[in-house]
Image (cartoon, grey):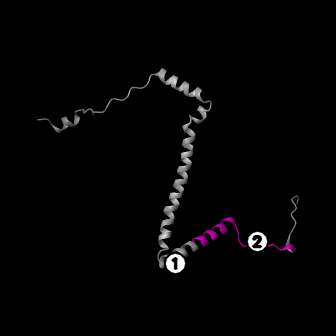
Amino acid sequence: MVSVCALANRAVEPNWPSPAKPASADALHSTAAAAHTASPLFDLAEGEEFWGNVAKYGRYFVTVMLGTGYVMVQPVVAAFKRPVTAIVAIVCIGGGAVLLKFTLDAMLGIQEPFVYEPGNVVPYNAFN
């Protein structure tokens, strides 16, 4: 009878496929040389697919921003379907706008609105 420890210590080799053989160094060098001489901007742009990938990231960014906006607006739209939640949503949106105004006023140091009175204008002299 075989003990449990003997089974645990036995090495079991997995049945994985063998890895693909790498290309020879000469084949890699000739491929790289041909690609390098094909375009003088190859080092900068790494071939033609670079700019295609850059364009894909721009489209991806726009798609993510539109999806995020859609997900954020859906609860608000759903709240406007019932009168009670519509009133609460309007009050919350108005309160958020007032809170934003007061916060920006405090951050920017705006105490009172600017009033132009022609008799109280003091000329500015940069050399005083």
Picture residue at 54% right of the left edge, 38% below the top: 49
Residue 114 is marked as: 2
Contact, mark 1 vs mark 2 (Cβ under 8 Å): no
Does residue 105 belong to the magenta stretch? yes
Reading the chain from its start, which is encountered first: label 1 or label 2? 1
Vertical arrangement, residue 122 with respect to residue 57, above or below: below
Q: How many marks?
A: 2
Quadrant where the C terminus lies?
bottom right
Tell me the magenta residue range. Answer: 95-118
Residue that mark 1 sits on: 87
Quadrant housing residue 50: top right
Badge 1 marks a residue whose secondary structure is helix
Q: Is residue 69 above or below residue 57?
A: below
Which residue is painted at 50% across and 63% down in the image? 72
Q: Secondary structure at mark 2?
A: loop
Q: Main secondary structure of the magenta part?
A: helix
Local crowd size for mark 1, using a 10 Å CA cut-off: few (<14), some (14–19), many (≥20) = few
CA–CA distance in space, label 1 to label 2 = 34 Å
